[in-house]
Image: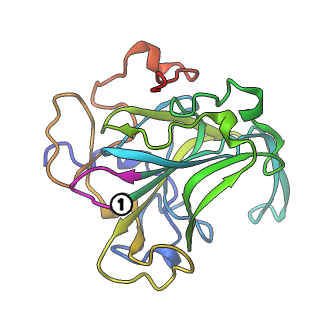
Amino acid sequence: MTGINVHASLYGTGADPNIITLGPKTGGHPDWPPYAGKCGMGFELKRGTPILAPIDMVLVGFTNNNAEYDVQWVEKTNSMERFAPVDDLKLYFESASPDWPGMIMLAYHLYSSPLLLGHQQNPDCNRSVKMGSSFQVQGRLYFAFNDDVVSKGNATACNAMIGRTVKRGELIGFAGTVGTHSFADFCLKVSHTSENPTVQKGNPYLHWVQPGSFFYWKCYSPDAVFPSGVLAYPFECGGYQLPAEQRDVNFKYASVN
């Protein structure tokens, strides 16, 4: 278990305990309480930091919520505040790992992804002026209390590689920014024999967990030995770096016809 869970200082806000139905309910940074409905944990990363796959998994859906700005109510200041920019590309994956069969992972607050060949390339798959005013959605999506197959907007313009398998340690995207806060969030829903009482629509045998306290994490490298069930940190660490061309936020994988 050498090198396990040694980067906890990078953990941000954890998930809302009210939606965690398997394992420990607390996790993340104790000084940053979660908001209602938050399903996962943030890693504090600079904008453009490469994001890696923590396990072998398949892209099953995406939402492009990237926008020039958003206006939201902020409880701390008791006022409406403007956030610019808003990076919120969301990627939904299903596990292809025998260690975690059926597990779902959502990565969000991403700036871009090599798995969406048209994102930031095709004008019809760029950021909207205001968050929620115009965006693209495709595939199976997982929310706090349900999951569904959705198609909305000009999703084909994003040319998403739905069905593409990425291996543990491979590039899946780049960390984004909301206002002045740069980070990337990860939600994980684990398959279990017990029924999740909060599910309103979709698979009742999937449970949201606290990523920082439910899993063991380890730095990825091509020669790293991962004990069964251990996930790779979704960022470069332990001296490992991606090839130079994959550190460019405009990098895209080659299309497979």
| Label 1 packing within 10 angstroms: few (<14), some (14-19), many (20+) | many
Left or right: where 138 falls relative to 205: right
**Residue 4, x across and y down, in percent:** 22, 48
State the residue position of label 1: 103
**Residue 175, x across and y down, in percent:** 55, 36
Residue for point 37% across, 58% down: 212
Query: Quarter-wise, where is residue 223 in the image?
Result: top left
- Residue 125 position (above or below residue 197): above
Task: Name the residue at the top extreme.
Answer: 244
80 or 153: nearer the eye?
A: 153
Left or right: where 59 falls relative to 62: left
131 or 59: nearer the eye?
A: 59
Q: Secondary structure at mark 1?
A: loop
Q: Please, what is the three-letter code of the amino acid marked with disc 1?
A: Met
Residue for point 57% across, 33% down: 116
Left or right: where 67 falls relative to 24: right
Display colour scheme:
rainbow
**Residue 32, x across and y down, in percent:** 56, 60
Query: Which residues, given as a range, are shown in magenta?
Result: 94-103
Q: Is residue 56 magenta?
A: no
Query: Quarter-wise, where is residue 235 in the image?
Result: top left
Q: Is residue 70 visible?
A: yes
Residue for point 56% across, 52% down: 139
**Residue 178, x across and y down, in percent:** 69, 43
- Residue 48 position (above or below residue 181): above
- Residue 38 position (above or below residue 18): above
Tally the marks. 1
Q: Is residue 178 visible?
A: no
Main structural element of the magenta stretch: helix, strand or loop?
Answer: loop
113 or 244: nearer the eye?
A: 113
